Structures are given as C-alpha cells and as structure tokens.
Amino acid sequence: MAEFFSDSVRTAITSLAQHKLRSLLSIVGIVCGVSTVLAIFAIGAGAEAETMRRIGQLGLNNIYLRADNLTEQQIARARRYQSRGLQIGDLTRLQTTGLPIRRTAASRDQRVELAGLPDDVQGRVIEATRDYRAVLGLTMAAGRFLADRDLADRNRVCVLGWSVSAALGADGKPGALIRIGSELWQVVGVLDRRDVDAAETGRISLLDINTMIIVPLGTLGAAADGEPVSELIVELATVERIEAATVVIAGTVRAAHHGVDDFSVIVPNELLSQAREIQRLFTIVFGSIGTLSLIIGGVGIMNIMLAGISERVREIGLRRAVGARPDHIVVQFLSEAVLLTTLGGLLGLAGGWALARGVSLYAGWPIVISSATIVLPLLMALATGCLFGIYPAFKAARMDPLQALGYGE
Amino acid sequence: MIVELRGVCHGYRRGADLVEVLGGVDLCLDPGDFVAVMGASGTGKSTLLHILGCLLRPAGGSYLLDGEQLQGRPERELAALRSRRIAHVFQMFYLLPHLDVVQNVALPFLYQEGLSRSEVRYRVDDAIDRVGLGQRRKHRPAELSGGELQRVAIARALAPRPDLILADEPTGNLDARTGGDILDLFQAMNDDGHTIVMVTHDRHVASRAGRLVTLRDGTLHDG
Ligand SMILES: Nc1ncnc2c1ncn2[C@@H]1O[C@H](COP(=O)(O)OP(=O)(O)OP(=O)(O)O)[C@@H](O)[C@H]1O
Ligand SMILES: [Mg+2]
C-alpha cells in the first residue's frame, strides 16, 4: 500500500519533471486563482479587522445622539418651538421608554485651553458624566475616572488622555494640578492609550481619546442641565432589535424637542453592517474572478493529464497486466493532478501574498494573513485539481488493458 | 490440474461481422508443464494466451484455474490473479522507461498486499539474480540491450512466484543467440517447477518445450 502510493507520487514527479515547461504552463490558471483568492481573503480579513477596530471601539451596543450645527431655518424653528437642543434631561425621558438600557452618558465639548501643553500636542477639553468611561469601554492607566460626587459637587477634577498625560510629564500624573482656562484642576486619573488614527476617526472625532481632558459635566460652564450637551450615548443591554430601539430613541428625543431635528443618530452597529455589506460585495466580485481562474486552471490540469495519458497508454496497459486494478490507475493519475495543483497552489500562495502586500502598500489597506487565508485557497485548488483530474483519471482506468498494450491495432 | 480450458471460444468484431478466432479450445495443464503453442499468424495464439492470463474474458466456454471457475469473476479478482498467480512475458518487453531494473521487477508487488517489504526485496533481488542481471540493478531500460530487456521482463514475471508463466513470442524480437539464452532461462524456470505456456513460430524453440500444441482453425491439436 505504502509502496503503491510512493510509486504513484514518484511516477507523478517523474512525468512532471519530464515536461517541465508544459507542467508549468498548465498550472498558470491555478496559480492565478489561488493568488487572487488569497489576496481577497487577506484584504477582506484586514478590512474586517480594521472596521471592527474602528467601529467596535464606539461600542456595538451604543446609540449616539449628536447635536447638529443648525441651519438658519432650523434655528428659527427651534426658537419657535422652544427646543433647547440635546439635554441631559433627554436621557431621563428615555428611561421611561422601557427599552433595555444598560447605561447612558453625556458629554459637552468645551472650547477652553489647557495650559502647559507643547504646541504639537492637541488637547481637547470635554465635560462628561460618570458612565462615559464604561459606555466607551475605556480603561484606566492610573487613578480613577469621574465619580458621582465629582458631578454632584462640581469638583474641579479631570481625567487625562494618554498623550496629554505623557506630554505634561510629571504634571500629567494623578494628584498633579493643571490649569484649564483660568482655574487649577486636579488630575485624578489617566486613561489607557488607545491606538486610533486621528484621520481615520475623523467622522467620529470624539473618539480621539488620547488627546482628551475630561472634566465633570457642569464644572466648566453652565450647570449640567443648563445648556445643551454635544452628545448623548445610550448603551443597550443587548444588540438584538437595536434598529427598533434606535427608532424609539430618536422618536422620543425628537418629540421632546417639539419635532425639531437638531441632532443626528449614529449607530455603530449599523455602520458595521454597512461596512460589512460593502466588503461582502467586494469579496463576491473578486472571489468570482478567483474562482473563474481556478476553473480555467482546472481545465489546464485536465488538458495536461489527457495529454499525459495518451502518451502513457502502454504504461497503463502494462500496469493493468501485472495486476493494477482500475482504482489503482485512478489513484495514480489523481495523485498527478493533486501534485500539480499543490505545486500551483504553493506558487499561488506566494503570488497571493505578494499581491496582498502590494495592494496594502499601494492603497494603504491593512491585510490579515491567517491560517484560514492560507489553507482555504489551497483547499480550493486541491478540490479543483481533484474535480478536473477525475475525468482523465477515470478515462485512463477504463481503458482495456490489451488495447492499451497495443493488441488489436 | 492447474489449468483446464473447456470449449473456449472467442471472436472479434470486424465492421459488422463477428470473426470467430477460437472455436472451442480445450487445454489441460499440469503443474510443471512446459507447453509450446504454434500456429500460423492470426490463428489466435495471442488471444488464447490473453484468455489464459485473465486479460481477456472468453466469449464462451469455461476456464478453471487450480479448480476455480474464473467465469464471471469481478475485475478486482482477476487483477489480483494477474499480480500473484499468473505472469506474462511479452514480445515487446513492456518495461517502464522511467523506472530502473529493480523498480520494474517490483512492479507487480505494488498491486498486492500481505508481503513484507523485506520479503518483496528478497524476491525481487532473487529474480534479478536468476536472470543474470545482478550487475544491472540500477540501470534504466534505455541503458540495456534487447536481451537484457527481456531478462528484466522475465524477472518481473518470476518475482511474484506465479503458478503460471505465459510468454508470447519472447524471443521474437531477439537475435538467435540472445533468443537461445532466453530459452535457457525458460528451461531453467521450468526445471524449478514453473508451469510455462510459450507461443512461438520457431520449431527449434518449440522443441525445447516438453509438449507442443498447434492452433489450427480455431482449435488446439497436439503435436
Ligand atoms: N482487439 C482485436 N480486435 C479485432 N480483431 C482482433 C483483435 N485482437 C486480435 N484480433 C484478430 O484476431 C485474430 C487473432 O489474433 P491473435 O493476435 O490472437 O493472433 P496470433 O495467432 O497471435 O497472430 P500472430 O502470430 O501474428 O501474433 C487476428 O486476425 C487478429 O487480427
Ligand atoms: Mg500473437
């Protein structure tokens, strides 16, 4: 048995080696197919990981209500209907909707400068509530986040983003005092670093966590419920039926604003599904191209095997005469097809890797090469080889041994 | 009795007609027999040999090998017989060009199970030694003479220790001297107890066999 297989492989190698150019040409299609498929998988997985990283940080259970810059018309309408913009009170109203709300948070952008920052470091001061940290999934590098009493007592405390803290050096550690506007504030905590390209998150600028200086809501300017906030965040206990919850939340807040559309709704979960949908289309289109070249590759394999078989009719007849069964012949020729496609597959992996790297360098897309992105295209190539090798192999096996040996010609 | 053919007939289609080649052949072989088959060209000697070698199913009649009826046996079983119990030596040698002598001789063992690797190696080496090619083990067919090629083919037939060795004009492609050496080999194999059926056109060759049969008009005749 083992001898039979090693003979099959040896025979396959010999026959490939005898026709190097021909064999090489026959696997071009497989090489292209595997390259394309691997590149698609790598780019797709990279895009998926990147999307998850970008959007996932927003919290997939979260719904964001963001205050809009109003047009003249909207301002007039807001005045007429006495809408006061996004309010922390809107959150209280949402609690009565019966939605499975786990946590809520509010934040308000403040145009105040933090003294002592080097020119190249941007610091952005925002006011926020206690659960802002949990809702965004932020973690502390040192110290603590804002507490209830900070908000109740309007304590002059602040939490620093990682790069702000680093830029301030010793003054950026918990316990230090820093100057915001004209007052001194005590640092109580430093957030963990979160790697996000500022450019990438441009759309959702609040997430540039590293440059933030977070103070309790209502400490810098008006009282917490005095002025509109910039953003409300609702974290649901479950992502199920998040669309329906979004409709309810938007409707409730709009009603509270007397129908004035002075806010927009951002649902990371929807962004994610949109991004995934686009990726899916991309994968389907290029996956089809890859599959097509695999099929063409399969035809190439079939062609070369048919040629090989007609050259080796005598060998087939002789093997049958000394005891080979038809299935032995099938295995022998299939192993040739498998060997060819494996060869093509390996070359294709190298090509696909180069292709993916090239695309990622040229277009700046991230790629992920995992065991799945390697094994799957290889398996596809093998399946193609077997599929297209079966017909020639059976053709060889069905030959009459005597005819194959040349009797009766 | 090792072989018993009874009323074996066979024919080939030529266009619309069915041309009968064998019309009721009877043949009995005892172990250790050395039979020469003669007959004019086209009388069906090769056809008879292919039937004996289970490469061809006869259209009619019965074939008992060692008392077992072979008619209607599945291809799988006939293939097993071809790898173990029956061996062919062809006029055209039919060696695989990319394999060396050892690999060519070992070919039938690829298709049978139950023998250990060392047993196979022993039988292969032994067969190669018997045909006098001990110095040519690693040679490819392209590096061997016609006589040596036929020796390799004989070693390949010999190595599985078959009950029956069938040779179809084994000296047909060789000069007289080389052919004589090959015949000596068959003689020696027969002396060792192998049962041999050999087709030949040469009366001298036939005289080396213990028994002569002639195929004429689709039937076998002694002498
Ligand atoms: N596969 C086949 N199809 C059609 N006719 C065949 C086939 N094989 C053999 N024949 C015919 O059957 C007849 C007997 O052929 P066979 O090869 O058995 O003769 P032979 O006695 O061995 O002849 P030779 O001495 O020339 O080798 C011939 O007329 C041959 O043409
Ligand atoms: Mg003949």
Image: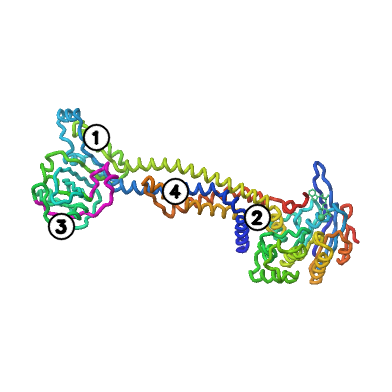
| Residue A200 on the magenta span | yes
Residue B38 placement: quadrant? bottom right
Relative side of A182 to B161, left or right: left
Which chain letter goes with mark 1? A
**Of B2 and A398, the residue lying toward us:** A398
Q: Earlier in the sequence, mark 2 or mark 1?
A: 1
| Same-chain check, marks 4 and 2 | yes
- Pointer 4 residue: A355
- Pointer 1 residue: A251
The part of the chain drawn in magenta is A184-209
Which chain letter goes with mark 3? A
| Same-chain check, marks 4 and 1 | yes
Q: Is residue B143 above or below residue A311?
A: below
Which chain letter goes with mark 4? A
Q: CA distance from mark 1 to mark 3?
A: 42 Å
Could you tell me the amino acid type at mark 3? Pro
Front label number (4 vs 2): 4
Q: Give the crowd class for mark 2: few <14, some 14-19, many >=20 residues within 10 Å.
A: many
Q: Does the residue tagged 3 have its C-beta within 8 Å of any atom of ligand 1?
A: no
Front label number (1 vs 3): 3
| Same-chain check, marks 2 and 1 | yes
Q: CA distance from mark 2 to mark 3?
A: 78 Å
- Pointer 2 residue: A329
Q: CA distance from mark 4 to mark 2?
A: 38 Å
* Position of residue B112 measured from the top left corner of the image (x, y, whole percent): 67, 63
Q: Earlier in the sequence, mark 2 or mark 3?
A: 3
* Position of residue B76 measured from the top left corner of the image (x, y, whole percent): 68, 57
Q: The residue tagged with tag 2: helix, strand or loop?
A: helix
Q: The residue tagged with tag 3: helix, strand or loop?
A: loop
Could you tell me the amino acid type at mark 1? Gly
Q: Earlier in the sequence, mark 4 or mark 3?
A: 3
- Pointer 3 residue: A174
